[in-house]
Image (spheres, helix red, strand yellow):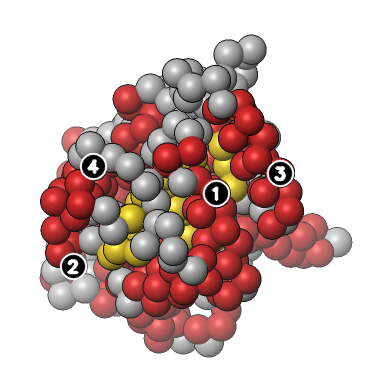
Amino acid sequence: MLHYAGPPGVGGVEATIAYHARGLADLGYHVRVISGSGGQFDQRVETHINPLFGSNHPDILAVKKQLDQGQVTSEFERLRAQLVHALRTAFEGCDACIVHNVHSLNKNLILTAALCELNGQPPCLAWCHDLAWTNTQYQPELHPGYPWDLLRQVWPGTVYVTVSEPRRVELAELLGVSPDTIHVVLPGVDPARFQFWTETTERLARELQWMEADGLLLLPARLTRRKNIALALRVLAELRDQSKRDFRLIVTGPPGPHNPANPGYLAELLSLRTELGIEETAHFLYAYSSGDAPLIPDDDTLANLFALSDALFFPSTQEGFGIPILEAGLAGLPVFCADIPPLRATAMELAVYFDPVQGNPAAIAALVLHTLDQTPTYQLRVRVRQQYRWDAMIRNQIVPLIDTLLNESERTDE
């Protein structure tokens, strides 16, 4: 990966490089970040720093001042030859390179010209975040001819990528090519980093594939009869049947320790879960311990669960208060809860209520489904979770692009 600056430097491109590098390393790729500044940010990722690849080196700035005035001097030619050699050294052993902005921006035109001299070796994904020739900010610095025209020409051995559909149309017009020849790979997010997931949360999300779900209902309670978890299981089954979507239920607590009948209730729940065919989608977290003791989420993990879930489902028939409702309020979750006085007193008119004893599971599921489908934040959350995670985007979009690039390069060589 090549850019003027690399991680851990602050910036949108630098962050993108870091996520791409980590994600590809997770998939077993050997990754090298080549840049003018930056440093080690992941022990699996090799770094190659050459200040002349950056945009702030005094020699680069001196030549840029000349270029901005339309002057291509002998110093430009000297530095270009030097950078051609430096790039060959940096690329040694590389099969492909993701190049950020160097094909389309004039922050270091010497680097752009040197890269062009390599004639597509290694083959490159030109990741075009910004376009100098279509931005009025850069117009005074651009002039007809070489090397400025390199920023609006199609290069050999290069596949072009933009970060949005409008940018793809803009680049296609600039290069005079069909938009279909340019790929769009959107930026993403990393829920684990953004929400400060614990190791337990990361393990559970990975093993249970929560990020692929269409809906995550959180039930923070011990497995005791008054928590009415059997109703939650029936509602989950109805939700999945009515919607034909992948809804899940996360029950956080272990069997209650104070009632000797609780193990019998747990057996009833497990039997009901099997009867309803939701063994893989109703998750009793106590069972996912990495040791002999049941898994009991700590405070940080429980906070993670509120942050990543789509709704609180709280069907308890007896409560003194409703602390999970307060936590759901802080997390911005819709609340579906039993219509009992303590919970009414807690949420007042700000929750969706149902009868926890006489309520029909199918009707409750329909109420949940209708409410969520009318909630834009839920719809956006699911879309981001499923489509805009870095790991999913790297696996589903970037890896196929790299494979395509390498295959095209092999055909060209033949």
- Disc nearest the viewer among 2 and 1: 1
Decide which of tag 4 and tag 2 comes sooner along the chain. 2
The quadrant in which residue 31 appears is top right
Which mark's residue is nearer the viewer, 4 or 2? 4
Give me the disc on residue 322.
4
In terms of depth relative to the viewer, which is nearer, 214 or 409? 214
- Quote the CA–CA distance across marks 4 and 2: 58 Å
Residue drawn 15% across the image and 49% down it: 346
N-terminal label among 4 and 3: 3
Q: Earlier in the sequence, mark 3 or mark 1?
A: 1
Residue 144 placed where, x, y %? 29, 76
Residue at the disc numbered 3 = 271
Badge 4 amino acid: Gly
Q: Up-down: is 244 above or below 102?
A: below
Q: Are marks 3 and 1 in contact (CB under 8 Å)?
A: no
**Residue placed most toward the observer, 276 or 137:** 276
Please tell me the numbered disc located at residue 138.
2
